């Protein structure tokens, strides 16, 4: 059974930092590309950051220079370090694991809420 469990969300003031974690089980983690998506209330789910199995990364323009995605294959965990947080970063953040080209190898976590507010 595949599980992706996000943690680390919460309430933070503007300008603050949070680190999200996503622990995976039931998959051969090192083979998967991992992504963080976010969905503000009433809006669609969009890609925030992505990391390939080889460690290459890409980011949404809105978070470049503030967010960093990383992975620890030994712990089957992907991280999202979020700095200089803004109110517009408020959303539910979801972890995704996928193998490109595979319809079946595409999994989601249940999400963790990040609220940026003073």
Image: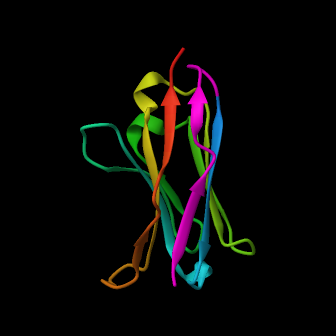
Residue 13 at x, y = what percent? 59, 20
Q: Is residue 1 left or right of residue 47?
A: right
Residue occupying image coordinates x 46% and y 48%: 93
Q: Reply yes or no: does residue 32 show up in magenta.
A: no
Residue occupying image coordinates x 31% and y 50%: 45
Q: Residue extending furthest right?
A: 74
Residue 55 at x, y = what percent? 60, 67
Q: Quadrant of the C terminus?
A: top right
Residue 11 vertical position relative to residue 110 in the rendered view, above or below: above
- Nearer-the-camera pick, 66 or 56: 66
**Residue 60 in which image quadrant:** top left
- Nearer-the-camera pick, 33 or 38: 38
Residue occupying image coordinates x 52% and y 69%: 52
Residue 63 at x, y = what percent? 47, 37
Residue 53 vertical position relative to residue 23 in the rendered view, above or below: below
Residue 54 vertical position relative to residue 89 in the rendered view, above or below: below
Q: Is residue 88 left or right of residue 118?
A: left
Query: In the rendered structure, which segment of residues is drawn in magenta?
Result: 1-16
- Nearer-the-camera pick, 61 or 2: 2
Q: Is residue 96 left or right of residue 41?
A: right
Is the image coloured rainbow, by chain, by secondary structure, or in one colour? rainbow
Residue occupying image coordinates x 58% and y 73%: 54
């Amino acid at each position: 059974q595949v599980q992706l469990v996000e943690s680390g969300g919460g309430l933070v003031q503007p300008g603050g930092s949070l680190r999200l974690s996503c622990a995976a089980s039931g998959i051969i983690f090192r083979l998967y590309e991992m992504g963080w998506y976010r969905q503000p209330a009433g809006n669609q789910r969009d890609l925030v950051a992505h990391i390939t199995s080889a460690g290459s990364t890409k980011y949404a323009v809105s978070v470049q220079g503030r967010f960093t995605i990383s992975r620890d294959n030994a712990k089957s965990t992907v991280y999202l370090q979020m700095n200089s947080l803004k109110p517009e970063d408020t959303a539910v953040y979801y972890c995704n694991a996928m193998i490109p080209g595979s319809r079946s190898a595409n999994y989601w976590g249940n999400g963790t809420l990040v609220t940026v507010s003073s």
